[in-house]
Amino acid sequence: MKKLGMYLLVVVSFAVSIYVVSMGGLNAANQSTVVTLFSIPFALGLVIISFMAIPKHSTFVRYQKGMENIFFILILVLTIIHIGLVFYLLDSGFPLMVLVPIGVGLVLIATANTLPRFQLETPSASSEYIKSTHTVWNKGLRHFSRPLIIGGLVMLLCAFLPQHLILVGFLTVLACTLLTSVFVLVRA
């Protein structure tokens, strides 16, 4: 489902760029504007190509879902940036600062949901040092992820703040989230 979503976002991004250029929403004589408008869709295409180039060996099965999530969120954030760029180029007056907490909030939520998938397996024949290291890593991932999810959700709410408070709210939530995650990780 995520793969289909990634392909759809790339196609929609190209379609929006083509629509804006063909409907005369931009000054067609300004070639730099057209290049700017298509830069993110081409970047999305490169991300899709990179995703398809990831080896599909059996040794990477454990990481496959996690990598799929990472690429999906990367494409989603680039699409959000593309939407903001289209609004900016059309001189719509859309407050672009709203996109910052949305993009970073999505990245934090995706990171928190992806980290537990990278847990280390502890072979029974391994030394005590390796067992304890793997146990601490696995335990720390869950504790580190919880504040990131909460912070990401609160950061999404920062997009609804008044225009002059969005940046202050965003930076406050980001700082609190990172400090809380590190504190919880050290305490665990």
Image: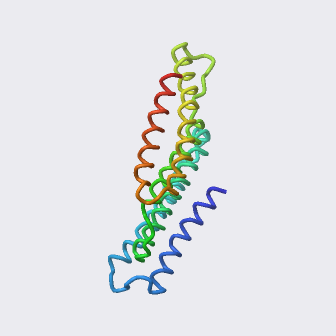
The front one of 168 and 184 is 168
Which residue: 53% across, 26% down? 137
Q: Where is residue 181 in the image (x, y as percent from the top left)?
A: 49, 33
Q: Which colour scheme is used?
A: rainbow
Q: Position of residue 24 (x, y in %)?
A: 44, 86
Q: Is residue 110 visible?
A: no
The front one of 117 and 55 is 117
Which residue: 47% across, 75% down? 17
Q: Can residue 115 be seen in this view?
A: yes
Q: Position of residue 173 (x, y in %)?
A: 47, 43
Which residue: 54% across, 52% down? 157
Furthest toward the right, the residue is 1
Which residue: 54% across, 27% down? 140
Q: In this view, does 168 lie above or below 120?
A: below
- Snapshot quadrant of residue 63: top right
How many numbered discs, if any?
0
Q: In this view, does 32 lie above or below 61?
A: below
On the rendered image, what quadrant is the N terminus found in? bottom right
Q: Position of residue 138 (x, y in %)?
A: 57, 27
The front one of 180 and 139 is 180
